[in-house]
Image (cartoon, grey):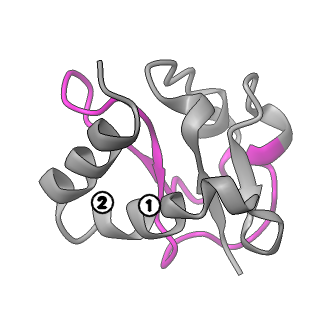
Amino acid sequence: MTYFITTPCIDVTDQSCVDVCPVDCIHFEEGKDRMLYIDPDECIDCGACEPACPVSAIFAEDDLPDDQEPFREINVLWFQDKDAARAKVQAISPA
């Protein structure tokens, strides 16, 4: 199991979750990304990030709300094709 970052993080990128992550599995490119992403291969499922998020954007895989399901793919995709993940975020929340 892993954690996923979802819609409330878009255009917030608070980074409180980054500060508490013991394995540094939360990433983004400043100036390019509108949200943060959790690397499912690096995440150790400790859950430290979830309560640290001030906008409640982080969910355990099993607790991901149905309306946030696209973020399962988006978080994984970012580590394979950043531009494709960014396009999906843009489609969900145009700015």
**Percent x, y for residue 52?**
79, 33
Whether residue 67 sits left or right of residue 90 in the image: it is right
Identify the residue position indicated by label 1 in the image.
Answer: 75
| Callout 1–callout 2 Cβ contact below 8 Å | yes
Q: Calculate the distance from the C-alpha at mark 1 to the C-alpha at mark 2.
A: 6 Å
Please provide the residue range marked out in magenta: 21-50
Residue drawn at (31%, 26%), measured in percent from left and top? 94
Is 40 part of what is drawn in magenta? yes
Q: Amino acid at mark 2?
A: Trp
Identify the residue position indicated by label 2 in the image.
Answer: 78
Residue drawn at (57%, 20%), measured in percent from left and top? 14
Along the viewing direction, whichever of 28 and 72 lies nearer the viewer: 72
Residue drawn at (62%, 54%), measured in percent from left and top? 68
Residue drawn at (25%, 36%), measured in percent from left and top? 29
Whether residue 12 sits left or right of residue 61 in the image: it is left
Q: Amino acid at mark 1?
A: Asn
